[in-house]
Amino acid sequence: DAGITQSPRYKITETGRQVTLMCHQTWSHSYMFWYRQDLGHGLRLIYYSAAADITDKGEVPDGYVVSRSKTENFPLTLESATRSQTSVYFCASSELDSDQPQHFGDGTRLSIL
Amino acid sequence: GQQVMQIPQYQHVQEGEDFTTYCNSSTTLSNIQWYKQRPGGHPVFLIQLVKSGEVKKQKRLTFQFGEAKKNSSLHITATQTTDVGTYFCAGSNAGGTSYGKLTFGQGTILTVHP
């Protein structure tokens, strides 16, 4: 899906550092989501956004911050990275509603040493 | 909160054998979706079921939604090596605190031996 892009694809950082993962979509979808994927846990929702300047917590929001100043961008920031935040992070978007089919980006593989 | 349990976690089959993964929710769902994730890839939407007892087919894939809208299954007939990947169900809660959000199951990792 070329319409939603994540950057970087891979990132290695150290505990305590601030890290920002970027997500950009070209479809003008209202809803955007951040998930983390860990073996045995499937996809867990971190934060989501219904529109610009509207964000809400998901299942595992602690340690993360999001913003959505423009419809097309939804960055995810780890303010002080911890090893437990080592994971694969997926951004997704949905046109109609928060529980409708979602389109995923290619993911960011984040390792925190 | 809402829980969506998916079994089995792993399934190894010989090419040509059938495969089924099951999804169970602790609450009634308004809809259920299925996604496929190839190794190293991202989840890709396959299908959405909305009605009680609904059955949908996509070539060799058959999707069912239970009468009580609390469970679902994905069945693949005569698996091929291209079916390899992780299959996720994702349910949307019909009410309560998780209303309007998708909850993903843990996924079933399918391996197909040629």
Image: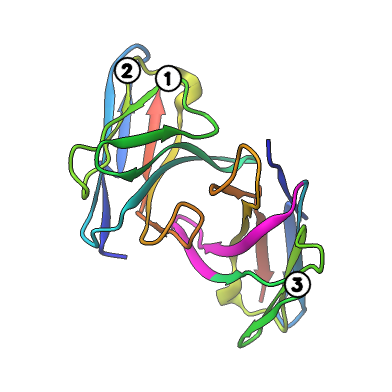
Amino acid type at circle 2 is Glu
Give the left or right position of residue B53, taking residue B63 as reference: right
User: What residue sits 34% from the left and 17% below the top?
Assistant: A14
Marks 3, 1: nearer the viewer? 1
Question: Label 2, on which residue?
Answer: A79
Residue B10, percent from left and from top? 73, 55
Question: Label 3, on which residue?
Answer: B19
Q: Which of the 4 image quadrants contains residue A33?
A: top left
* Span highlighted in magenta in the image: B27-46
Badges 3 and 1: C-beta atoms under 8 Å apart?
A: no
The residues tagged by marks 2 and 3 sit, at their Cα atoms, a distance apart of 43 Å
Q: Which of the 4 image quadrants contains residue B14?
A: bottom right
Amino acid type at circle 1 is Gly
Can the viewer see residue B22 in this picture? no
Q: Looking at the image, tell me whether mark 2 or mark 1 is earlier in sequence order.
A: 1
User: What residue sits 45% from the left and 55% below the top?
Assistant: B40
Question: Label 1, on which residue?
Answer: A63
The chain carrying label 2 is: A
